[in-house]
Amino acid sequence: MNSYRKVSVMDSLKNVLYWLIANSLGGFNRGRILEQLFQKPQNANELSKSLEIEYKTIRYHLKVLEENGILTSVGGGYGKTYFPTENLETNKQYFTEIWDKIGKKSNKESIA
């Protein structure tokens, strides 16, 4: 029974990631944010500068990702720093699988 529960939690994470990245407006930017945060924890200002996305837009996407259990944060205010959750770190392959299919496609479309 424990393994069943674990599988359903992982499936749930994969479904949420798919919805947030591949099946919703703003998913491409959320994917880019997650890519950056897998490299190193950052605050909204750092992400805004490195991704060249408006600060308010970054803050919105961080809030959505945090509310859906994809990110966690430490600190507050301007210096609030974001990290992938332990569950996401453990199951990073779900993000990679979705991002390789959807993110790269979206990137090519935005360049064309």
Image: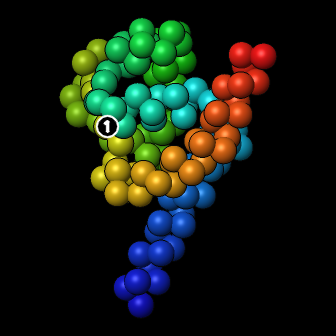
* Residue denoted by label 1: 83
Left/right of residue 58 with respect to residue 15 in the rendered view? left
Q: Nearer the viewer, residue 35 or 10?
A: 35
Tell me the kind of residue under disc 1: Phe
Is 4 drawn above or below residue 76 in the view shown? below
Q: Is residue 71 visible?
A: yes
Is 94 drawn above or below residue 72 in the view shown? below
Q: Nearer the viewer, residue 3 or 105?
A: 105
Residue at the extreme left: 75
- Write the residue at 54% across / 63% down: 12
* Residue 39 rendering spot, x and y as whole percentages: 33, 32
- Write the residue at 30% across / 53% down: 86
Q: Is residue 25 visible?
A: no
- Write the residue at 53% across / 12% down: 53
* Residue 6 rendering spot, x and y as whole percentages: 41, 75
Left/right of residue 27 with respect to residue 80 in the rendered view? right
